[in-house]
Amino acid sequence: MIFWIAIIGLLLLASFILIIPMIGIRSSSGVDSRQQQNVAIAREKKSLLEQQLSEGEISQDEFDSAFHDLQTALALDLERTESGELKQRGKWATWVAVAVLPFLSFGLYFQFGEYRVIEDPTLAQVPVQQQIGQPHGNLSVEAMIDLVKQRLLDNPDDARGWFMLGRTFMSQQKFDQAVAAYQRTYNLLGEDPNVMLSLADALAMQREGVMTGEPEQLVLRALEISPQDTTGLWLAGLAAEQRQAFKQAHDYWTRLLPLLGDDPVSSQEVRQLISNVEQRDPALQTRVVTGKSLTLAVSLSDEIRHLVTANDLVFVYAKAMNGPPMPLAVKRISVLELPTQVTLRDDDAMVATMKLSSFDQIIVGARVSKSGNPVAQPGDLFIEIQGVDSNNLPPGLELSISQIK
Protein backbone atom coordinates (compact mmCIF):
# COMPACT_ATOMS: atom_id res chain seq x y z
CA MET A 1 0.00 0.00 0.00
CA ILE A 2 2.80 2.43 0.91
CA PHE A 3 4.45 1.76 -2.43
CA TRP A 4 1.30 2.66 -4.34
CA ILE A 5 0.85 5.82 -2.27
CA ALA A 6 4.42 6.81 -3.10
CA ILE A 7 3.84 6.19 -6.80
CA ILE A 8 0.63 8.24 -6.81
CA GLY A 9 2.46 11.00 -4.93
CA LEU A 10 5.21 11.03 -7.52
CA LEU A 11 2.71 11.19 -10.35
CA LEU A 12 0.93 14.07 -8.67
CA LEU A 13 4.24 15.81 -8.11
CA ALA A 14 5.22 15.33 -11.76
CA SER A 15 1.83 16.66 -12.85
CA PHE A 16 2.14 19.59 -10.51
CA ILE A 17 5.59 20.42 -11.86
CA LEU A 18 4.18 20.43 -15.39
CA ILE A 19 1.36 22.78 -14.37
CA ILE A 20 3.54 25.23 -12.45
CA PRO A 21 4.77 27.14 -15.52
CA MET A 22 1.17 27.75 -16.56
CA ILE A 23 -0.04 29.35 -13.32
CA GLY A 24 0.93 32.18 -11.04
CA ILE A 25 2.71 35.50 -11.74
CA ARG A 26 5.12 35.55 -14.65
CA SER A 27 7.28 38.37 -13.26
CA SER A 28 10.97 37.80 -12.67
CA SER A 29 10.37 37.86 -8.93
CA GLY A 30 7.64 35.26 -9.45
CA VAL A 31 10.04 33.14 -11.41
CA ASP A 32 12.63 33.30 -8.65
CA SER A 33 9.98 32.50 -6.04
CA ARG A 34 8.75 29.54 -8.07
CA GLN A 35 12.29 28.27 -8.51
CA GLN A 36 12.82 28.37 -4.77
CA GLN A 37 9.48 26.68 -4.23
CA ASN A 38 10.26 23.90 -6.70
CA VAL A 39 13.68 23.34 -5.17
CA ALA A 40 12.12 23.16 -1.71
CA ILE A 41 9.52 20.66 -2.92
CA ALA A 42 12.19 18.58 -4.56
CA ARG A 43 14.29 18.58 -1.42
CA GLU A 44 11.29 17.62 0.67
CA LYS A 45 10.44 14.79 -1.74
CA LYS A 46 14.07 13.66 -1.71
CA SER A 47 13.99 13.53 2.08
CA LEU A 48 10.77 11.52 1.92
CA LEU A 49 12.32 9.05 -0.52
CA GLU A 50 15.42 8.71 1.67
CA GLN A 51 13.23 8.05 4.69
CA GLN A 52 11.22 5.41 2.82
CA LEU A 53 14.47 3.77 1.68
CA SER A 54 15.93 3.68 5.17
CA GLU A 55 12.73 2.22 6.60
CA GLY A 56 12.60 -0.46 3.91
CA GLU A 57 9.37 0.77 2.35
CA ILE A 58 10.99 0.98 -1.07
CA SER A 59 14.02 -0.77 -2.59
CA GLN A 60 17.24 0.88 -3.74
CA ASP A 61 16.19 0.46 -7.38
CA GLU A 62 12.84 2.11 -6.71
CA PHE A 63 14.60 4.95 -4.89
CA ASP A 64 17.08 5.48 -7.72
CA SER A 65 14.31 5.49 -10.32
CA ALA A 66 12.11 7.91 -8.35
CA PHE A 67 15.02 10.21 -7.54
CA HIS A 68 16.08 10.27 -11.18
CA ASP A 69 12.53 11.19 -12.22
CA LEU A 70 12.48 13.90 -9.58
CA GLN A 71 15.77 15.41 -10.78
CA THR A 72 14.63 15.34 -14.38
CA ALA A 73 11.28 16.96 -13.65
CA LEU A 74 12.88 19.65 -11.50
CA ALA A 75 15.53 20.45 -14.11
CA LEU A 76 12.91 20.80 -16.81
CA ASP A 77 10.77 23.04 -14.68
CA LEU A 78 13.64 25.35 -13.71
CA GLU A 79 14.61 25.64 -17.35
CA ARG A 80 11.07 26.64 -18.26
CA THR A 81 10.67 29.16 -15.43
CA GLU A 82 14.00 30.82 -16.22
CA SER A 83 12.94 31.31 -19.84
CA GLY A 84 9.91 33.30 -18.76
CA GLU A 85 6.29 32.60 -19.49
CA LEU A 86 5.24 29.69 -21.57
CA LYS A 87 4.14 30.50 -25.02
CA GLN A 88 0.40 30.55 -25.24
CA ARG A 89 0.31 28.13 -28.15
CA GLY A 90 2.12 25.50 -26.10
CA LYS A 91 -0.25 25.41 -23.14
CA TRP A 92 -2.54 22.79 -24.63
CA ALA A 93 0.31 20.26 -24.88
CA THR A 94 1.07 20.62 -21.18
CA TRP A 95 -2.54 20.00 -20.21
CA VAL A 96 -2.63 16.92 -22.46
CA ALA A 97 0.56 15.61 -20.87
CA VAL A 98 -0.85 16.16 -17.38
CA ALA A 99 -4.01 14.28 -18.32
CA VAL A 100 -2.26 11.39 -20.06
CA LEU A 101 0.75 10.91 -17.76
CA PRO A 102 -0.98 8.96 -14.93
CA PHE A 103 -2.81 6.61 -17.30
CA LEU A 104 0.26 6.09 -19.49
CA SER A 105 2.49 5.40 -16.47
CA PHE A 106 0.16 2.83 -14.94
CA GLY A 107 -0.53 1.21 -18.31
CA LEU A 108 3.13 0.74 -19.14
CA TYR A 109 3.92 -0.56 -15.67
CA PHE A 110 1.20 -3.19 -15.70
CA GLN A 111 2.17 -4.19 -19.25
CA PHE A 112 5.94 -4.50 -18.81
CA GLY A 113 6.53 -4.34 -15.07
CA GLU A 114 6.33 -7.08 -12.46
CA TYR A 115 3.86 -5.60 -10.01
CA ARG A 116 3.59 -8.87 -8.07
CA VAL A 117 7.15 -8.37 -6.84
CA ILE A 118 5.73 -5.91 -4.30
CA GLU A 119 4.22 -8.79 -2.35
CA ASP A 120 6.88 -11.34 -3.27
CA PRO A 121 10.35 -9.86 -3.91
CA THR A 122 11.73 -13.28 -4.89
CA LEU A 123 9.88 -12.94 -8.20
CA ALA A 124 12.50 -10.40 -9.22
CA GLN A 125 15.06 -13.20 -9.35
CA VAL A 126 15.12 -15.76 -12.16
CA PRO A 127 15.58 -19.20 -10.58
CA VAL A 128 18.61 -21.10 -11.74
CA GLN A 129 16.32 -24.08 -12.49
CA GLN A 130 14.38 -21.92 -14.93
CA GLN A 131 17.59 -20.73 -16.54
CA ILE A 132 18.67 -24.32 -17.07
CA GLY A 133 15.31 -25.29 -18.56
CA GLN A 134 15.48 -22.52 -21.16
CA PRO A 135 17.37 -22.84 -24.45
CA HIS A 136 20.87 -21.35 -24.29
CA GLY A 137 21.96 -21.34 -27.89
CA ASN A 138 24.77 -18.87 -27.16
CA LEU A 139 26.05 -20.55 -23.99
CA SER A 140 29.06 -22.83 -23.99
CA VAL A 141 29.09 -26.19 -22.26
CA GLU A 142 31.20 -24.65 -19.50
CA ALA A 143 28.58 -21.93 -18.99
CA MET A 144 25.87 -24.58 -18.73
CA ILE A 145 27.95 -26.47 -16.18
CA ASP A 146 28.29 -23.26 -14.18
CA LEU A 147 24.49 -22.90 -14.18
CA VAL A 148 24.05 -26.46 -12.91
CA LYS A 149 26.71 -25.92 -10.25
CA GLN A 150 24.93 -22.76 -9.08
CA ARG A 151 21.69 -24.71 -8.92
CA LEU A 152 23.37 -27.37 -6.82
CA LEU A 153 24.85 -24.76 -4.47
CA ASP A 154 21.32 -23.53 -3.83
CA ASN A 155 19.92 -27.06 -3.59
CA PRO A 156 22.67 -29.59 -2.75
CA ASP A 157 20.15 -32.45 -2.40
CA ASP A 158 18.95 -32.18 -6.00
CA ALA A 159 19.73 -35.70 -7.21
CA ARG A 160 18.58 -34.97 -10.76
CA GLY A 161 20.96 -32.01 -10.96
CA TRP A 162 23.91 -34.13 -9.80
CA PHE A 163 23.02 -36.85 -12.32
CA MET A 164 22.80 -34.27 -15.13
CA LEU A 165 26.18 -32.90 -14.11
CA GLY A 166 27.67 -36.42 -14.17
CA ARG A 167 26.38 -37.05 -17.69
CA THR A 168 27.81 -33.73 -18.86
CA PHE A 169 31.23 -34.55 -17.40
CA MET A 170 31.12 -38.00 -19.05
CA SER A 171 30.45 -36.41 -22.44
CA GLN A 172 33.53 -34.21 -21.86
CA GLN A 173 35.58 -37.22 -20.74
CA LYS A 174 36.14 -35.60 -17.35
CA PHE A 175 35.83 -38.91 -15.60
CA ASP A 176 37.04 -37.83 -12.14
CA GLN A 177 34.33 -35.16 -11.94
CA ALA A 178 31.76 -37.56 -13.39
CA VAL A 179 32.53 -40.12 -10.68
CA ALA A 180 32.11 -37.47 -7.98
CA ALA A 181 28.76 -36.31 -9.41
CA TYR A 182 27.40 -39.85 -9.84
CA GLN A 183 28.61 -40.81 -6.37
CA ARG A 184 26.68 -37.88 -4.92
CA THR A 185 23.59 -39.01 -6.86
CA TYR A 186 24.05 -42.57 -5.57
CA ASN A 187 24.33 -41.30 -1.99
CA LEU A 188 21.08 -39.37 -2.41
CA LEU A 189 19.00 -42.01 -4.24
CA GLY A 190 20.45 -45.28 -3.00
CA GLU A 191 20.30 -48.40 -5.16
CA ASP A 192 18.80 -47.02 -8.34
CA PRO A 193 19.99 -49.31 -11.20
CA ASN A 194 20.36 -46.46 -13.68
CA VAL A 195 22.53 -44.47 -11.26
CA MET A 196 24.56 -47.53 -10.23
CA LEU A 197 25.32 -48.44 -13.84
CA SER A 198 26.27 -44.86 -14.69
CA LEU A 199 28.60 -44.75 -11.70
CA ALA A 200 30.11 -48.13 -12.68
CA ASP A 201 30.72 -46.89 -16.22
CA ALA A 202 32.37 -43.69 -14.94
CA LEU A 203 34.55 -45.64 -12.50
CA ALA A 204 35.67 -47.97 -15.30
CA MET A 205 36.51 -45.07 -17.60
CA GLN A 206 38.39 -43.40 -14.75
CA ARG A 207 40.47 -46.61 -14.57
CA GLU A 208 41.07 -46.67 -18.35
CA GLY A 209 38.24 -49.10 -19.06
CA VAL A 210 38.85 -51.62 -16.30
CA MET A 211 35.48 -53.03 -15.19
CA THR A 212 36.69 -55.47 -12.55
CA GLY A 213 36.38 -54.63 -8.87
CA GLU A 214 33.98 -51.94 -7.69
CA PRO A 215 32.45 -51.23 -11.14
CA GLU A 216 31.57 -54.91 -11.63
CA GLN A 217 30.10 -55.12 -8.12
CA LEU A 218 27.81 -52.17 -8.88
CA VAL A 219 26.77 -53.75 -12.18
CA LEU A 220 25.95 -57.12 -10.64
CA ARG A 221 23.93 -55.48 -7.88
CA ALA A 222 22.02 -53.46 -10.47
CA LEU A 223 21.24 -56.68 -12.38
CA GLU A 224 19.90 -58.26 -9.20
CA ILE A 225 17.40 -55.39 -9.04
CA SER A 226 16.73 -55.21 -12.80
CA PRO A 227 17.78 -58.51 -14.49
CA GLN A 228 16.73 -57.41 -17.98
CA ASP A 229 18.61 -54.10 -18.00
CA THR A 230 20.42 -53.99 -21.33
CA THR A 231 23.18 -51.67 -20.12
CA GLY A 232 23.75 -53.90 -17.11
CA LEU A 233 24.06 -57.04 -19.24
CA TRP A 234 26.42 -55.28 -21.62
CA LEU A 235 28.72 -54.07 -18.82
CA ALA A 236 28.54 -57.37 -16.95
CA GLY A 237 29.73 -59.18 -20.06
CA LEU A 238 32.63 -56.75 -20.44
CA ALA A 239 33.66 -57.29 -16.81
CA ALA A 240 33.49 -61.08 -17.17
CA GLU A 241 35.51 -60.97 -20.38
CA GLN A 242 38.22 -58.89 -18.66
CA ARG A 243 38.40 -61.58 -15.96
CA GLN A 244 38.69 -64.12 -18.79
CA ALA A 245 35.45 -65.70 -17.60
CA PHE A 246 34.41 -66.19 -21.21
CA LYS A 247 31.46 -68.45 -20.49
CA GLN A 248 29.95 -65.85 -18.15
CA ALA A 249 30.51 -63.12 -20.74
CA HIS A 250 28.90 -65.36 -23.37
CA ASP A 251 25.90 -65.96 -21.11
CA TYR A 252 25.40 -62.25 -20.40
CA TRP A 253 25.58 -61.27 -24.05
CA THR A 254 23.35 -64.08 -25.31
CA ARG A 255 20.80 -62.92 -22.73
CA LEU A 256 21.24 -59.37 -24.01
CA LEU A 257 20.88 -60.04 -27.73
CA PRO A 258 17.13 -60.84 -27.88
CA LEU A 259 16.38 -57.79 -25.70
CA LEU A 260 17.77 -55.38 -28.30
CA GLY A 261 14.71 -55.87 -30.48
CA ASP A 262 14.76 -53.78 -33.63
CA ASP A 263 18.16 -52.15 -33.01
CA PRO A 264 20.29 -53.67 -35.77
CA VAL A 265 23.43 -51.67 -34.95
CA SER A 266 23.55 -52.74 -31.30
CA SER A 267 22.58 -56.28 -32.22
CA GLN A 268 25.50 -56.50 -34.63
CA GLU A 269 27.90 -55.21 -31.97
CA VAL A 270 26.72 -57.83 -29.48
CA ARG A 271 27.01 -60.60 -32.06
CA GLN A 272 30.59 -59.51 -32.63
CA LEU A 273 31.28 -59.65 -28.89
CA ILE A 274 29.78 -63.15 -28.74
CA SER A 275 31.88 -64.20 -31.71
CA ASN A 276 35.03 -62.82 -30.07
CA VAL A 277 34.59 -64.84 -26.86
CA GLU A 278 33.71 -67.95 -28.86
CA GLN A 279 37.00 -67.62 -30.73
CA ARG A 280 38.89 -67.26 -27.44
CA ASP A 281 37.12 -70.29 -25.94
CA PRO A 282 36.40 -72.95 -28.60
CA ALA A 283 34.16 -74.83 -26.16
CA LEU A 284 31.59 -72.07 -26.57
CA GLN A 285 31.29 -72.63 -30.30
CA THR A 286 28.10 -74.68 -30.10
CA ARG A 287 26.87 -75.41 -33.56
CA VAL A 288 23.11 -75.79 -33.68
CA VAL A 289 22.10 -79.24 -34.78
CA THR A 290 19.63 -79.21 -37.61
CA GLY A 291 16.26 -79.95 -36.14
CA LYS A 292 12.88 -78.62 -37.11
CA SER A 293 12.31 -76.91 -40.43
CA LEU A 294 9.43 -75.09 -42.06
CA THR A 295 8.91 -74.59 -45.78
CA LEU A 296 7.03 -71.45 -46.85
CA ALA A 297 5.59 -70.62 -50.29
CA VAL A 298 6.12 -66.86 -50.69
CA SER A 299 4.38 -64.79 -53.37
CA LEU A 300 2.95 -61.32 -54.11
CA SER A 301 -0.78 -60.71 -54.36
CA ASP A 302 -1.94 -59.11 -57.61
CA GLU A 303 -3.39 -56.14 -55.69
CA ILE A 304 -0.02 -54.84 -54.52
CA ARG A 305 2.26 -56.05 -57.31
CA HIS A 306 2.34 -52.56 -58.86
CA LEU A 307 3.78 -51.14 -55.62
CA VAL A 308 7.05 -53.08 -55.74
CA THR A 309 10.16 -52.79 -57.87
CA ALA A 310 12.66 -55.37 -58.99
CA ASN A 311 15.28 -54.00 -56.56
CA ASP A 312 13.12 -54.39 -53.42
CA LEU A 313 14.31 -56.88 -50.83
CA VAL A 314 12.08 -59.48 -49.18
CA PHE A 315 12.67 -60.77 -45.65
CA VAL A 316 11.10 -64.11 -44.73
CA TYR A 317 11.12 -64.82 -41.01
CA ALA A 318 9.79 -66.69 -38.02
CA LYS A 319 9.56 -65.27 -34.50
CA ALA A 320 8.18 -66.30 -31.14
CA MET A 321 4.51 -65.52 -30.61
CA ASN A 322 5.11 -64.93 -26.89
CA GLY A 323 8.73 -63.98 -26.49
CA PRO A 324 11.42 -61.57 -27.63
CA PRO A 325 10.67 -59.67 -30.86
CA MET A 326 13.96 -60.81 -32.36
CA PRO A 327 13.46 -63.28 -35.28
CA LEU A 328 14.18 -66.95 -34.58
CA ALA A 329 15.18 -67.44 -38.20
CA VAL A 330 15.28 -65.12 -41.21
CA LYS A 331 16.26 -65.32 -44.87
CA ARG A 332 16.61 -62.53 -47.42
CA ILE A 333 15.59 -62.78 -51.06
CA SER A 334 14.63 -60.30 -53.80
CA VAL A 335 11.30 -59.50 -55.41
CA LEU A 336 12.68 -60.91 -58.67
CA GLU A 337 12.74 -64.38 -57.07
CA LEU A 338 9.01 -64.37 -56.27
CA PRO A 339 7.10 -66.60 -56.25
CA THR A 340 9.43 -69.04 -54.53
CA GLN A 341 9.77 -71.45 -51.65
CA VAL A 342 11.84 -70.61 -48.56
CA THR A 343 12.80 -73.10 -45.85
CA LEU A 344 13.53 -71.90 -42.32
CA ARG A 345 15.43 -74.30 -40.04
CA ASP A 346 16.76 -74.46 -36.53
CA ASP A 347 20.27 -73.89 -37.86
CA ASP A 348 19.12 -70.59 -39.37
CA ALA A 349 18.81 -69.27 -35.81
CA MET A 350 20.54 -65.96 -35.14
CA VAL A 351 21.35 -67.10 -31.57
CA ALA A 352 21.98 -70.68 -30.51
CA THR A 353 19.44 -70.51 -27.72
CA MET A 354 16.77 -68.85 -29.87
CA LYS A 355 15.49 -71.26 -32.53
CA LEU A 356 12.24 -72.58 -33.97
CA SER A 357 12.09 -75.53 -31.62
CA SER A 358 12.58 -73.32 -28.55
CA PHE A 359 8.98 -72.02 -28.62
CA ASP A 360 5.66 -73.82 -28.91
CA GLN A 361 3.83 -71.06 -30.81
CA ILE A 362 5.49 -69.00 -33.52
CA ILE A 363 4.65 -66.35 -36.08
CA VAL A 364 5.81 -66.66 -39.69
CA GLY A 365 5.83 -63.79 -42.14
CA ALA A 366 7.28 -62.16 -45.22
CA ARG A 367 7.93 -58.47 -45.75
CA VAL A 368 8.93 -56.39 -48.78
CA SER A 369 11.26 -53.70 -47.42
CA LYS A 370 10.90 -50.49 -49.45
CA SER A 371 13.90 -49.01 -47.62
CA GLY A 372 16.08 -52.14 -47.71
CA ASN A 373 16.18 -52.00 -43.91
CA PRO A 374 15.64 -55.26 -42.04
CA VAL A 375 13.70 -53.26 -39.44
CA ALA A 376 10.05 -52.78 -40.44
CA GLN A 377 9.24 -49.29 -41.75
CA PRO A 378 5.98 -47.53 -42.72
CA GLY A 379 5.16 -48.29 -46.34
CA ASP A 380 6.53 -51.86 -46.27
CA LEU A 381 4.36 -54.63 -47.71
CA PHE A 382 3.87 -57.75 -45.60
CA ILE A 383 1.91 -60.82 -44.53
CA GLU A 384 2.00 -62.70 -41.21
CA ILE A 385 0.46 -65.94 -39.95
CA GLN A 386 0.22 -66.31 -36.20
CA GLY A 387 -0.23 -69.30 -33.96
CA VAL A 388 1.85 -71.78 -35.93
CA ASP A 389 2.47 -74.89 -33.77
CA SER A 390 6.24 -75.51 -33.81
CA ASN A 391 5.69 -79.00 -32.34
CA ASN A 392 3.60 -79.95 -35.34
CA LEU A 393 4.89 -77.81 -38.19
CA PRO A 394 2.78 -78.05 -41.37
CA PRO A 395 4.51 -79.38 -44.48
CA GLY A 396 3.96 -76.05 -46.26
CA LEU A 397 2.45 -72.64 -45.65
CA GLU A 398 1.53 -70.03 -48.23
CA LEU A 399 2.54 -66.43 -47.58
CA SER A 400 0.91 -64.13 -50.11
CA ILE A 401 2.15 -60.60 -49.37
CA SER A 402 -0.90 -58.36 -49.52
CA GLN A 403 -0.87 -55.79 -46.69
CA ILE A 404 0.71 -52.34 -46.33
CA LYS A 405 2.29 -51.36 -43.05
Image: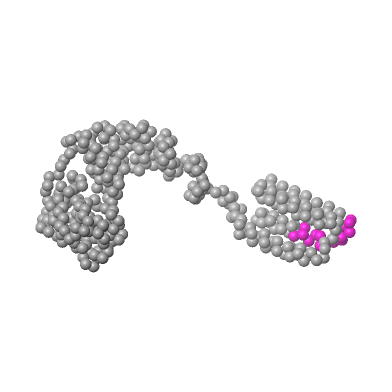
Quarter occupied by the N terminus: bottom right
Q: Is residue 217 left or right of residue 5?
A: left
> Percent from the top left, x then y, of residue 341?
15, 57
- In the rendered image of this protein, does residue 322 appear above or below residue 178? below
Which residue sits at x=19%, y=51%? 329
Which residue sits at x=80%, y=51%? 39
Which residue sits at x=26%, y=53%? 374
Q: Is residue 295 left or right of residue 194?
A: left
Quarter occupied by the C terminus: bottom left
Looking at the image, can residue 203 be seen? no
- In the rendered image of this protein, does residue 356 appear above or below residue 170? below
> Percent from the top left, x then y, of residue 222?
31, 40
> Percent from the top left, x then y, of residue 82?
84, 55
The image quadrant of residue 167 is top left
Looking at the image, can residue 403 be seen? yes
The image quadrant of residue 212 is top left
Classified by dominant secondary structure, the portion drawn in magenta counts as helix
**26 drawn magenta:** yes
Which residue sits at x=72%, y=56%? 10
The magenta-colored residue range is 15-30
Total marks in image: 0
List the single residue furthest toward the bottom: 303
- In the rendered image of this protein, does residue 58 appear above or below residue 162? below
> Percent from the top left, x then y, of residue 344?
16, 52
Viewer-nearest residue: 279 or 88? 279
Viewer-nearest residue: 369 or 319? 369
Give the colouring mode of the picture: one colour
Viewer-nearest residue: 91 or 404? 404
